[in-house]
C-alpha cells in the first residue's frame, strides 16, 4: 500500500513539471548597463512549434521573473538590437505576433523614470 501511495505521488509531481525548454538566443545590455534585452526561443514539446519571446530585465535579473514584451511564433529572422541608449528595436521578416508592448519601465530602475521605447519593424532589409 505504501509503495502504491508513493508511486501515485511521484506520478502526480512529474505531471506538474513544465514541459517547456527555453534557449537563450541573445542577451545584451543597454548603453547605461541598467537593463538587458533577452531573446529566448521556447519549445514545449514535439507536437508544438517554437515561440520567440523578448524580455527587458533589470541588469543581473532573470527573465524568468519578468513578463515578455514580445511573443510570436512562425518567426523568420528575428533580430533584437539597441538603436540608442533607451530604444530597443525588434525586427523580423515575418511572424504571428501574440503580444507586443511599445515601452518598458520599472520601479527598480530610477523609480519608473528610466523608460525604454520599443520599436517593432517588419522586414530585416
Image (cartoon, rainbow, N blue to C red):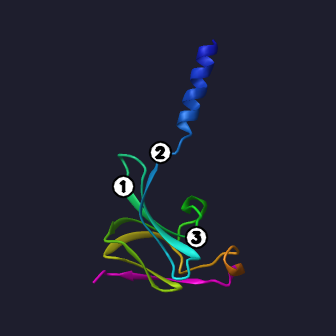
Q: Nearer the viewer, mark 1 or mark 2?
A: 2
In reply to whether residue 113 is colored magenta, the answer given is yes
In the rendered structure, which segment of residues is drawn in magenta?
112-125
Please indicate whether residue 107 sits to the left or right of residue 54 in the image: right
Q: What is the CA distance from the residue labelled 1 to the residue labelled 3?
A: 30 Å
Q: Earlier in the sequence, mark 2 or mark 3?
A: 2
Q: Earlier in the sequence, mark 1 or mark 3?
A: 1
On-image quarter of the N terminus: top right
In reply to whether residue 107 is colored magenta, the answer given is no
In terms of secondary structure, where does tag 3 sit? loop
- Give the residue number, with chain letter if any, for mark 2: 19
Residue 113: % across, % down = 68, 84
Q: Residue at x 57, y 61 (%)?
A: 62
Residue 52: % across, % down = 41, 64
* Label 3 packing within 10 angstroms: few (<14), some (14-19), many (20+): some
Residue 123: % across, % down = 31, 81
Q: Residue at x 53, y 81 (%)?
A: 102
On-image quarter of the C terminus: bottom left
- Give the residue number, with chain letter if any, for mark 1: 49
Residue 88: % across, % down = 48, 81
Q: What is the CA distance from the residue labelled 2 to the residue labelled 3?
A: 27 Å
Contact, mark 2 vs mark 3 (Cβ under 8 Å) = no
Q: Which mark is residue 59?
A: 3
Q: Is residue 50 above or below residue 92?
A: above
Amino acid at each position: 500500500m505504501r509503495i502504491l501511495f508513493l508511486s501515485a505521488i511521484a506520478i502526480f509531481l512529474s505531471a506538474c513539471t513544465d514541459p517547456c525548454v527555453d534557449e537563450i538566443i541573445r542577451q545584451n545590455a543597454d548603453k547605461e548597463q541598467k537593463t538587458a534585452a533577452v531573446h529566448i526561443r521556447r519549445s514545449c514539446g514535439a507536437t508544438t512549434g517554437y515561440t520567440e519571446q523578448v524580455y527587458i530585465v533589470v541588469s543581473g535579473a532573470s527573465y524568468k521573473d519578468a513578463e515578455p514584451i514580445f511573443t510570436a511564433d512562425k518567426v523568420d529572422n528575428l533580430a533584437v538590437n539597441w538603436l540608442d541608449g533607451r530604444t530597443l528595436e525588434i525586427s523580423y521578416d515575418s511572424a504571428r505576433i501574440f503580444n507586443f508592448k511599445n515601452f518598458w519601465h520599472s520601479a527598480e530602475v530610477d523609480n519608473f523614470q528610466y523608460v525604454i521605447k520599443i520599436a517593432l519593424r517588419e522586414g530585416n532589409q
